[in-house]
Amino acid sequence: MYQYKIHNLVAGILILVLLCFNVWGEEESAVPVKISFPAMGTKFEFIIYVQDKDMLEEDVRNLCAPAMEEVYKLERHISHYMEDNNLARLNKSAGMGKVAVNNDLCEAFKLSRIFWERTGGAFDPTVGPLLELWGFRGKPREFPPSDAEIEEVKKRVGFEKVKIDEKGCYVELTVPGMKVDFGGIGKGMALDRAGRILKELGINNALLHSGTSSVLALGSPPNKSGWKIGIRSPYNRKEEVESFEICNESLSTSSISEQFLEQSGKKLGHIFDPRVGRPVDNDVLSVTVITKCASESDALSTAFYVLGKDKTIEYCKKFPEVKVFMLLKGNEVNELKKEYINLNRSEELP
């Protein structure tokens, strides 16, 4: 019997935070304060150590308000979760000529073009029509799309169909029906923006994360060399398979654990190969990327999931500052293989 079912983990935020991010390092001399707020379809959280134990969470929230507002501002302009923001209006104008966009949206397009070019199209925010076709956006499907449907929709996918006039911040989606979705880079951009503002406010030691996928480490906890981040097994959320310590770096993880479709008992994740128009189907279970900025780690974790191990190794030879940890399918059921790229053994924690 043929099955086609979309699975959305309602408790995905809590589960995947536990899956990807365990934080240690509390010291008696400082108190960690957690500031949480919803944005971009997930829960953002800032973890900040304060020396004044009498400082209330409300005081810390007020201190962090400019950084939070920057996340909200970016959401208003580039998030696909909002129906009447700048991105939504641009998508509705596909095929109608160039459209003036604000600086935030222009930056999102410029950054996306960089990673689209570097990854040979494995990262591509024009994937929106494919997400809708397969039922990950908009109306769910009862059955998977046909080959003919996929080929037809692929005509509206491809960043080469985007024209960017940087002089006046104009963008043109040249084919009617195109739809841009910055889900693979938007949260990383928001973390980078928030991190810069916190530093301007004098907060140099904090951990910021966007719920399910990316974390940005500013400095380190008191008397620690970095923030310890645990990676959980995609087969068993109670099992930690690796951990890394990061300081003034970002870490992003992509996997199919959050959202997947099922075809005849086989899981296919929400990560698409935009070049072929289908969900990625390879031996990659999860990809963790460590870089200096969250927008880069966010985009590359998605791209490397699409590219697979060998192409990712080729990429990292060109960009040795990019560190990657992959979990791959083993030969046995529920067996994991680990792949470390540009990560020295000294950087792996027991």
Image: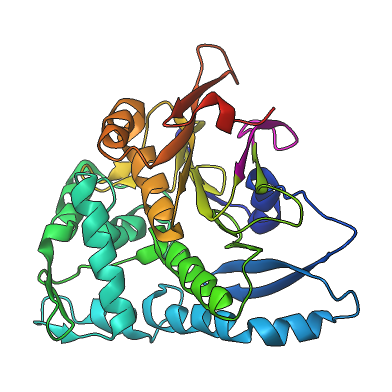
Tell me where residue 36 appears, x and y as whole percent. 69, 72
Tell me where residue 135 appears, x and y as whole percent. 40, 56
Q: Residue at x 24, y 85 (%)?
A: 101
* Residue 43 position (above or below residue 225): below
Q: In the depicted view, which residue is nearer to us: 157 or 350? A: 350
Q: In terms of image quadrants, where is residue 276? A: top left
As drawn, which residue projects farthest toward the front? 223
Q: Quadrant of the C terminus?
A: top right
Q: Residue at x 56, y 49 (%)?
A: 258
Q: In the depicted view, which residue is nearer to us: 343 or 266? A: 343
Does the magenta segment cover residue 250?
A: no
* Residue 75 position (above or below residue 304): below
Instruction: Point out the stretch of residues depicted in magenta.
Output: 232-245
Tell me where residue 60 appears, x and y as whole percent. 74, 80
Q: Is residue 178 visible?
A: yes
Q: How is the image coloured?
A: rainbow
Q: In terms of image quadrants, where is residue 318? A: top left
* Residue 159 position (above or below residue 254): below
Q: Is residue 27 left or right of residue 65?
A: right
Q: Is residue 216 left or right of residue 63?
A: left
Tell me where residue 93 appears, x and y as whole percent. 19, 82
Q: Residue at x 37, y 53 (%)?
A: 299
* Residue 77 position (above or below residue 269): below
Q: Is residue 16 left or right of residue 216?
A: right
The total number of labels drawn is 0
